Image (tube, grey):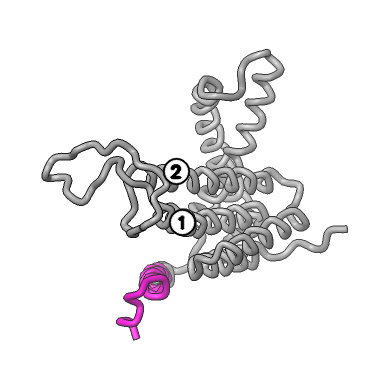
Amino acid sequence: QRRGALHPGAWWLWALALGTAATRTTNPLLLALLVAVSAYVVVTRRPHAPWSRSYGAFVKLALAVLLIRLLFTTLLGSPIPGTHTLLTLPEVPLPDWAQGIRLGGRVTAEGLTFALYDAMKLATLLICVGAANALANPCRLLKSLPGALYEMGVAVVVALTFAPNLIADVHRLRAARRLRGRPDRGVRGLLQVGLPVLEGALERSVALAAAMDARGYGRTAQVPARVRRTTAALTLGGLLGVCAGTYGLLTAAGGTYG
């Protein structure tokens, strides 16, 4: 039996906490545990709503990022020196202005291991964001914002609902193509479905924002212009501070921030 729905802001804070933990380690066991925790929570707590289907798409995106990173490391090499050579690819000579770039050559176990661990961090972060998209209700998130942040909230809701609507349109169009006997997989099916899917997802996201605007979501009272300008300036300063603090937290140069 499902429990009561939590506040969408709580889901986003939980997902961001998991993502922050993922960026602080390269241990594959810990990263796998973070993915397992997010998957378990999504399976047990996600609602029966269109946005709850986006988790699987984020998992596929994370796997694609992982494979692309390994492919790039194989073709372009790795800055990590290694002694255990797995294979040697034909190396393409590059002009002098492309010094520092290598195409082909030795593929070492150390370079692939470093690329795998680094890609797992990004993949885990994407999966955590997908968990928040699958669990948080964007309408409730906008409704809980103060009136001074209403316009920014509408833009955020459009952005957050774009990916879930995209996934819903993909399932709908693929089912329609299967019923008509047309291919729904492979490059051909992707090309014929891609443009209608993007157009439909964007239209539905804008329609959702317009519908919530008409119903007064997020507004509590008329906000004076002075308060609105002050809130916008403080919000911008807060975002810049968060960016600077995140950079200082996630990089080795963070000690210079005190």
Q: Nearer the viewer, residue 205 or 211?
A: 205
Q: Which mark is nearer the camera, 1 or 2?
A: 1
| SS at badge 1 | helix
Please say whether residue 104 is visible from this viewpoint. Answer: yes
Circle 2: residue type = Ile
Residue 26: percent from the left, percent from the top?
A: 50, 65
Quadrant the C terminus occupies: bottom left
Could you tell whether 31 is left or right of 250 in the image? right
Residue 146: percent from the left, percent from the top?
A: 55, 67
Circle 1: residue type = Thr
The question of residue 226 being in magenta is answered with no
Say which label, 1 or 2, has the lower sequence index.
Answer: 2
Residue in the image at 25% along x and 45% along y: 102
C-alpha span from label 1 to label 2? 14 Å
Residue 3: percent from the left, percent from the top?
A: 82, 63
Relative height, residue 228 to residue 96 (above, below): below
Q: Dots 1 and 2: beta carbons under 8 Å? A: no
| SS at badge 2 | helix
In the image as oriented, which residue stretches furthest toward the bottom?
A: 258
The question of residue 245 being in magenta is answered with yes
Toward which corner of the image does residue 176 lie, by quadrant?
Answer: top right
Q: Nearer the viewer, residue 95 or 2?
A: 95
Toward which corner of the image does residue 183 lie, by quadrant?
Answer: top right
Residue 85: percent from the left, percent from the top?
A: 39, 50
Residue in the image at 58% along x and 60% along y: 218
Could you tell whether 3 is left or right of 31 in the image? right
User: Is the stretch drawn in magenta largely helix, strand or loop?
Assistant: helix
Residue that mark 1 sits on: 113
Residue in the image at 63% along x and 55% along y: 131
Q: In the rendered structure, which segment of residues is drawn in magenta?
A: 231-258
Residue that mark 2 sits on: 68
